[in-house]
Amino acid sequence: MEPGEPREPREPQEPREPGLEAEAAATPHWEKANSVAPKRKPKLPKPQNAVTIAVSSRALFRMDEEQRIFTERGVEEYVRYQLQHENEPFSPGPAFPFVKALEAVNQRLRELYPDSEDVFDIVLMTNNHAQVGVRLINSINHYGIAAATIFSPSKNVVVSQTQLRVAFDGDAVLFSDESERIFKAQGLHGFFEHEKAHENKPLAKGPLKGFLEALGRLQKKFYAKGLRLECPIRTYLVTARSAASSGARALKTLRSWGLETDEALFLAGAPKGPVLEKIRPHIFFDDQMFHVAGAQEMGTVAAHVPYGVAQTPRRTSPVKPAPPVQ
């Protein structure tokens, strides 16, 4: 997953002290999560075989009080507080359900393919002070997880703990921003004409195509066991395109890549937040902050993909001077 690390405008930044730049997560405690001890300890996957998911510490855990102390009292008091409370696990943060769902998929994969390394490898990323690392590790061990820098939702919504649900925007996320550039330059009518003329020409790949490919690869491992309907991974295309006028090109592009999503939702410009509230994905990727904010308001954990023409700042027209008074 390579959308970059989105900014978090509603929260202050983590203390930037030397220390843990990247902390590999401990082996998940399957026995804690499911009250059933495995017959043998799962082996750690090799990076080249696994689907690596990197998650920031402040997305995985809630650290509001700790951040307040750092801001108001400084780094020494912050470190002292963390040392005093290092045996108290942090409360779950917005990415916690997402990571739990990833673990649930891993468990099912290991049951079906005990020796396979084709699983999710979850890595905790932090730029915290080294002394804070003990509390982070203790928290990881307490829950049996480790952890994607994302935007926190405005309200809590219950999501599945047994089925991973991932929702993607289309243009500038799964696909390139080719069509968005046409829309910006030629307007809606020009966009419709362009899509109609190029319906059978696949769009170029976008930054999240690889993640959908990885999810699809893991889904097929369940399909091979006759578990299509019981698959613990479900994917969604949630796009502002219209099904009647421009949806066919999106679907044909996925087909040309040998990919599919479980559901394709064409909203014809309608807000995405209400639909996402019904789907309840663990994470939703979009290139436009307008849609990210709309998802947040409805309780969806959303990630901004900093790619494409939508990231170009709008140029304001110069103000014409008023005519001189005669």
Image: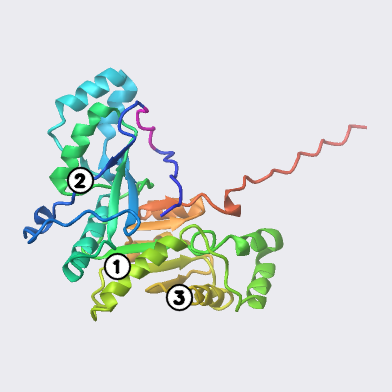
Identified by mark 1, the residue type is Ile
**What predominant SS class does the magenta segment belong to?**
loop
Measuring from the top left, give residue 21's x and y in whole percent. Answer: 34, 35
Gap between marks 1 and 3 measured at Cα: 17 Å
Q: Give the side of residue 112 with respect to residue 167, left or right.
A: left
CB under 8 Å between callouts 2 and 3? no
Q: Quadrant of residue 17?
A: top left
Q: Where is mark 1, residue-wise?
A: 233
Measuring from the top left, give residue 297's x and y in whole percent. Answer: 39, 52
Q: Residue at x 57, y 69 (%)?
A: 203
The local secondary structure at tag 2 comes to: loop
Q: Quadrant of residue 262?
A: bottom left
Gap between marks 2 and 1 measured at Cα: 23 Å
Q: Is residue 91 magenta?
A: no
- Using the rendered image of the protein, determine whether residue 275 is visible from the camera's viewpoint: no
Q: Quadrant of residue 51?
A: bottom left
Q: Residues within 10 Å of mark 3 (few under 14, many from 20)?
A: few
Q: Where is mark 3, residue-wise?
A: 258
Q: Where is mark 2, residue-wise?
A: 26
From what the image shows, is residue 147 above or below residue 190?
Answer: above
Q: Give the side of residue 32 with respect to residue 185, left or right.
A: left
Gap between marks 2 and 3 measured at Cα: 35 Å
Please report the bounds of the magenta region as a residue range.
11-16
